Image (cartoon, rainbow, N blue to C red):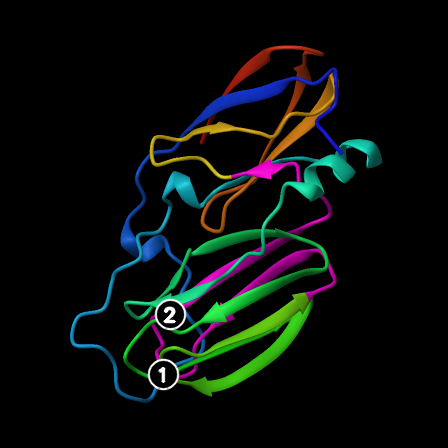
Amino acid sequence: MTAPTEAGVLKGRILAPPMKAHASPPNPYGGHASALPVAAVQVPGLVSDAVVYFERISAAAESVLALQSSRPALAQKDQCFVPRVLPITRNSVVDFPNMDPIYHNVFSVSPAKRFDLGKYPRGESRKVTFPKTGVINVYCDIHSNMAATIFVLPHHAYTQPDADGRFALPDVPGGRYVLKVWHPDRPPLTREVDVPAEGEATVMLEY
């Protein structure tokens, strides 16, 4: 199946002021084992951690976008989860590879999906299927600094901004849409937008 014959693209930019490090929500699950000598530091509030998406799209548009998707992964690297925020669609299978020279554990107690992959070493990977939409907080019970979020959406019409806040959503049929922005450290944003049947529209959003 190919892209719709009449489809437009929404491009835009999100402006977000820097946040202080203490604004990041703490990991409530304390670690208790060895760590890397130098672990990467995750900065809260980065605009690239936002998820930009349409509230709803047609079934026909979703069937096209679904064919263009690839299998997502949330890696354990430099004693961090990479990426910090992983948007996926409902029923996606996510791989959790360990790329560090130490053991990690991956688990969540979020209502949308509870799981515990146990402890496993570098080179191993485990997987989880996510059948429900929602926000899923992911942790490692060995290293208290490790935390990530999986944001499960009902469709594939989403994207994430680059480091400058610029984004482009997948092509969708022309019409009026409700645009939403979710961020783990910032309040949600909502805007009604018109997408042309051909070409592109632009939008500016600001926190």
Q: Quadrant of residue 196?
A: top right
Q: Residue 94: x and y, percent? A: 58, 64
In the shown orientation, is residue 138 left or right of residue 76?
Answer: right
Give, as a three-letter code, the residue at label 1: Gly
Q: Which residue has dot 1 on it?
A: 31
In the shown orientation, is residue 44 left or right of residue 134?
Answer: left
Return the residue nearer the eye: 58 or 187: 58
Secondary structure type for disc 2: loop
Note whether 135 is above or below 123 in the view shown.
above
Write the residue at 60% across / 38% down. 158
Write the residue at 74% across / 21% down. 173
Q: Which quadrant does the N terminus fall into? A: top right
Q: Which residue has dot 2 on it?
A: 146
Q: For residue 3: magenta?
A: no
Return the residue nearer the eye: 124 or 32: 124
Q: Which residues are magenta?
A: 130-159
Note whether 186 is above or below 43 in the view shown.
above
Note whether 139 is above or below 178 in the view shown.
below
Q: For residue 138: magenta?
A: yes
Write the residue at 30% across / 82% down. 102
Query: Dot 1, crowdedness within 10 Å: few (<14), some or many (≥20)?
Result: some
Give, as a three-letter code, the residue at label 2: Met
Q: Is residue 157 visible?
A: yes
Q: Which quadrant does the C terminus fall into? A: top left
Label 2 close to label 1 by CB (< 8 Å): yes
